[in-house]
Amino acid sequence: MRTININGTDHQLDVDDDMPLIWAIRDIVGLTGTKFGCGQALCGACTVHLDGVPVRSCQTFVGDAEGAAITTIEGLSGNVPETVQTVWAEMDVPQCGYCQSGQIMSAVALLAETPKPSDDDIDAAMGGNLCRCASYHRIRGAIHEAARRLEA
């Protein structure tokens, strides 16, 4: 039996330590905002925060997450996430939308760490998040706009 904390709530899970965190989040806890993409930590669709750091939940195991604070897209709160999500909607960033929860999770972590990111900062932070619709210019623009609003 493992206890993992997701979005501030402890969950008792009777699963193997090597179960990928994404399946615990989606299939056991029932939070489906975190998307399964490639299963190899290459696309970023499954990004969650582990103690505030963006990680790929498809390659992070339940045993590794025990004792950490896990935040999913459903659990984001506060000024930075709310600003990012507002800007994302206002600027029509998503096209198909499948990758966007991972994109937002990475953008929030970036802006929490680097309030005024340069294009290079954005490229480095977002480089592991793929978008099949190629809305990268809108993602970068939204991150810059969110940074401007957060600065005000």
Image (cartoon, rainbow, N blue to C red):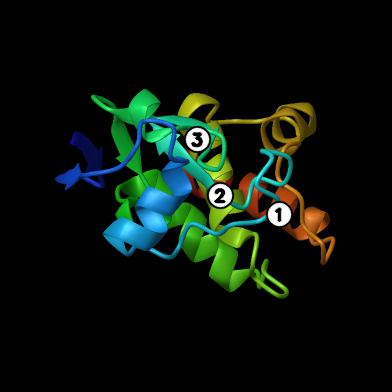
As rendered, which of 99 and 42 lies closer to the eye?
42
Q: Amino acid at mark 3?
A: Ala
Determine which of the numbered discs, if any, sits on residue 109 in the image: 3
Q: Circle 3: is it few (<14), some (14-19), or many (20+) Cα within 10 Å?
A: some
The answer to whether one can see residue 45 in this image is: yes
Q: Is residue 1 above or below residue 76?
A: above
Residue 24 drawn at (x, y percent): 36, 50
Determine which of the numbered discs, if any, sits on residue 72 in the image: none
Q: Amino acid at mark 2?
A: Cys
Q: Earlier in the sequence, mark 1 or mark 3?
A: 3
Considering the numbered disc 2 on the image, is that residue within a helix, a strand or a loop? loop
Q: Circle 1: is it few (<14), some (14-19), or many (20+) Cα within 10 Å?
A: many
Distance from the alpha carbon under mark 2 to that under mark 3: 14 Å
Q: Amino acid at mark 1?
A: Ile
Residue 34 drawn at (x, y percent): 48, 57
Q: How many marks?
A: 3
Considering the numbered disc 1 on the image, is that residue within a helix, a strand or a loop? helix
Determine which of the numbered discs, if any, sits on residue 46 in the image: 2
Q: Residue at x 50, y 35 (%)?
A: 109
Residue located beneath label 1 in the image: 139
Q: Is residue 61 above or below residue 39?
A: above
Q: Earlier in the sequence, mark 2 or mark 3?
A: 2
Q: Earlier in the sequence, mark 1 or mark 2?
A: 2
